[in-house]
Image: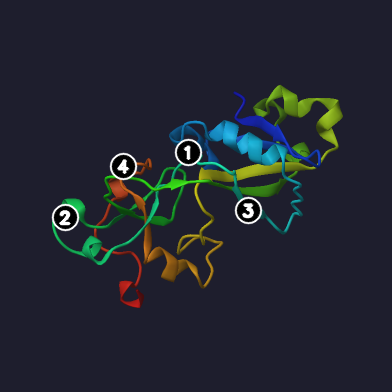
Amino acid sequence: MSETRKYIETTANNGIVSVDIEHSHAATHLREQPGLWELTQEVLRRSHIVTPPDKDAVFETDMGRTVGEMDLVDVEPSDWEGPKEHRIRWARRMNRETWTPLVVRDKRPSTRFITVVLKHLDIARLDPTALDPKLLEPEIADRQHHDLYTTYIGRKTPSLPGDRYETGESLPYWLSHALIWGTQAVQEDTVRYDSPWPVDEQ
């Protein structure tokens, strides 16, 4: 078996962060957003992080400088009508089962923020043949391990409707926001122009 879990960084309180480079949400962003690996390492190095088994660490970090462009924008009334090629549409992104709203935009807004989500990871329960050799080093075996669930350039948002982490904020937020079409890898056969959600609540 090839190594699919890679070491990414050690946190400020000596936690070990790794990422599934094939199947995770983080994997798609790390492939799509240049420089994100290094920016995520910078965030983790300066962060004190604890991830109990029942609670994720979800946070955004102001990097103190512009670090890139966000894919997230406000939805305008015109996005719901007009020619099909300009209308809002929905699709399932790679490695995801939820619907994501997508809109056409010429420019992406710049941002100073990186958002990271980490989960508790029991490294001893994983197949050692799938692990980066660094994760098997004896000196880090007893440290707390974290799974990099996702990381992206931009601000923290509520989970998408239909996600297991959905909250009461999810639907109202994602009826007024969308990601920019063409910036995200999607499952092409899932693209649709009719809303999978009750748009009358917008």
Q: Is residue 164 above or below residue 10?
A: below
Secondary structure, mark 3, is strand
Q: Which numbered disc, 4 or 3, marks the residue closer to the eye? A: 3
- Camera-side residue of 128 and 178: 178
Residue 138 rendering spot, x and y as whole percentages? 85, 27
Q: Which residue is mark 1?
A: 28
In the displayed orientation, state which residue is furthest to the bottom. 201
Secondary structure, mark 4, is loop
Asked if residue 182 lies left or right of residue 157, the reply is left
Q: Which residue is mark 2?
A: 84
Q: Earlier in the sequence, mark 4 or mark 3?
A: 3
Q: Which residue is mark 4?
A: 182
Give, as a three-letter code, the residue at label 1. Thr
- Camera-side residue of 73 and 151: 73
Which residue is rendered at x = 68% and y = 40% of the image?
44
Secondary structure, mark 2, is helix
Residue 92 rendering spot, x and y as whole percentages? 38, 50
Q: Is residue 82 above or below residue 24?
A: below
Which residue is rendered at x = 65% and y = 28% of the image?
130
Using the numbered discs, state the Cα–Cα distance from disc 1 to disc 3 in whole angstroms.
19 Å
Give, as a three-letter code, the residue at label 4. Gly
